[in-house]
Image (cartoon, rainbow, N blue to C red):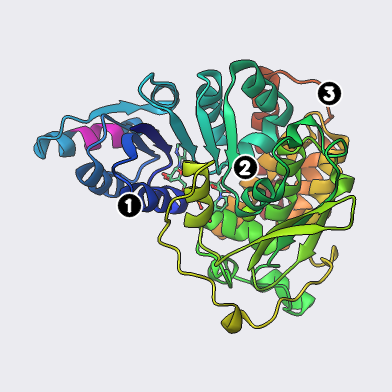
């Protein structure tokens, strides 16, 4: 039996992970679940999966969960805070850790799994954006295995040669083609963008996801974060990665080889496919995803992204080219900007200009250690918040 910890089990990826694991109870045993504050959600999951541990990042929520679980007579031990998350990521009876917390809050728990040498099913792209070099180095040092859950990176992993870790040029890979749907505003008149609402931004045409990544998809910051993620996962440079708009979201990404071959991975847009792939790799298991009907899809379109419409994508390329602490600044400013947009404090088009302002205000340091990255993350958040308040007042 494979022991599984799911960090962020009440979210979109967490729920899909439990759906797949629940189809294979002969293979996977859920050891630990975790959430931020969603006591109702995790209570139901605990009743269904009877884990040894449940962690709430919020201490008051942990207290409430403890009372509820003991009223059900469950033996599940309740832990709290980042320490609790780090504990369940590193337990000896845990083999695989699904890292599906949203945002930089997922970094320390994912790093705890890396340092314990686990297989990490990495959905939390922000942790690689913030600390890519350090994260990958720690994984190598501790023999941790990182399997990408992000559908594009999972597709790339499936299309890569087995020895891609030697370096893409060495193994004949010339280019990564990272596909993007273009989100809900791909064809909206540019002058209408400043007035779009959070609900419009979260109405993704193909994928059902958490609200933060949905807004990131609408600005295409999500693709920018994914370019950075791909640089670290596949040991490559941003100029080797081409973003391709593909509105149908059927091809999840492609790898080009030196002989002119391009390998693609296709499937219905359902995260249970990459989750099942990473859970079973190198084997295959069923995921519950319907078979792709190509006649229904009928056509596949491709376009170049418009950087005037999607300035966040250009900002992300600039940040990874600058490297050092720049991606951590970009990510932190984006998290604050997206939250401010979702809570009605700023308009949609202010997201990009706010991030640009924060990047312009902060120096970029090279070779940062973890402590420095966390300090930069906090400082970028402070500057972004200050910028919002000063504009509003
Ligand atoms: P979500 O908002 O639906 O769920 C987030 C989960 O993290 C919840 O369980 C929540 O309780 C927990 N959480 C939130 N803040 C926390 C904190 N401060 N401390 C501890 N736990 C916290 O998000 P999601 O859409 O499932 O995305 C999760 C991650 O996976 C993100 O990094 C996202 O970019 C990535 N991802 C998601 C999808 C998708 O289809 N949803 C696809 C690719 C990658
Ligand atoms: Mg993705």
Q: Compare marks 2 and 1 and give the one earlier in the sequence.
A: 1
In the rendered view, does 250 fall on the left or right side of 67?
A: right
Percent position (x, y) of residue 3? Answer: 36, 31
Cα distance, mark 2 to mark 1? 26 Å
Q: Secondary structure at mark 2?
A: helix
Percent position (x, y) of residue 209? Answer: 51, 59
Q: Is mark 2 within 8 Å of ligand 1?
A: yes
Please check the rendered image and state whether residue 246 is part of the magenta-colored stretch, yes or no: no
Q: Quick check: marks 2 and 1 in contact, CB under 8 Å?
A: no
Percent position (x, y) of residue 120? Answer: 53, 33
Disc number at residue 366? 3
The residue pinned by badge 2 equals: 125
Q: Secondary structure at mark 1?
A: loop
Cα distance, mark 2 to mark 3? 21 Å
Q: Quick check: marks 2 and 3 in contact, CB under 8 Å?
A: no
Foreground: 78 or 76?
76
Tell me the magenta residue range.
61-66
Disc number at residue 50? none
The residue pinned by badge 1 equals: 23
Is residue 259 placed above or below 270 in the rendered structure?
above
In the rendered view, does 260 fall on the left or right side of 102?
A: right
């Amino acid at each position: 039996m494979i022991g599984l910890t799911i960090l962020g089990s009440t979210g979109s990826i967490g729920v899909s992970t439990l759906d797949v694991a629940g189809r294979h109870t002969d293979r996977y045993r859920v050891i630990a679940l975790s959430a931020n504050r969603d006591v109702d959600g995790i209570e139901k999951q605990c009743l269904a999966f009877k884990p040894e541990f449940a962690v709430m990042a919020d201490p008051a929520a942990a207290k409430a969960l403890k009372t509820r679980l003991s009223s059900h007579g469950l033996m599940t031990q309740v832990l709290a805070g980042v320490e609790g998350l780090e504990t369940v990521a590193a337990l000896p009876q845990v083999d695989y850790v699904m890292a599906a917390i949203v945002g930089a809050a997922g970094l320390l728990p994912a790093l705890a799994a890396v340092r314990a040498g686990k297989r990490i099913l990495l959905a939390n792209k922000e942790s690689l954006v913030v600390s890519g070099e350090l994260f990958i180095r720690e994984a190598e040092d501790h023999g941790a295995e990182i399997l990408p859950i992000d559908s594009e990176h999972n597709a790339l992993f499936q299309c890569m040669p087995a020895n891609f870790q030697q370096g893409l040029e060495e193994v004949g890979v010339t280019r990564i083609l990272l596909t993007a749907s273009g989100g809900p505003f791909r064809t909206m008149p540019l002058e209408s963008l400043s007035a779009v609402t959070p609900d419009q931004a979260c109405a993704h045409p193909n994928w059902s996801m958490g609200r933060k990544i949905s807004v990131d998809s609408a600005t295409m910051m999500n693709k920018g974060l994914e370019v950075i993620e791909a640089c670290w996962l596949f040991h490559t440079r941003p100029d080797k990665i081409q973003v391709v708009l593909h509105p149908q979201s059927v091809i999840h990404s492609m790898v080009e080889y030196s002989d002119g071959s391009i390998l693609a991975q296709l499937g219905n847009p359902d995260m249970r496919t990459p989750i099942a792939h990473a859970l079973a790799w190198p084997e295959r298991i069923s995921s519950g995803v319907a078979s792709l009907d190509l006649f229904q899809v009928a056509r596949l379109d491709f376009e170049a992204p418009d950087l005037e419409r999607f300035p966040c994508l250009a900002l992300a390329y600039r940040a990874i080219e600058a490297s050092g602490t720049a991606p951590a600044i970009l990510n932190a400013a984006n998290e604050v900007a997206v939250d401010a947009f979702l809570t009605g404090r700023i308009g949609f088009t202010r997201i990009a200009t706010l991030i640009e302002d924060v990047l312009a205000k902060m120096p970029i340091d090279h070779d940062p250690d973890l402590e420095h990255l966390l300090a930069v993350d906090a400082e970028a958040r402070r500057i972004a918040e200050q910028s919002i308040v000063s504009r509003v007042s």
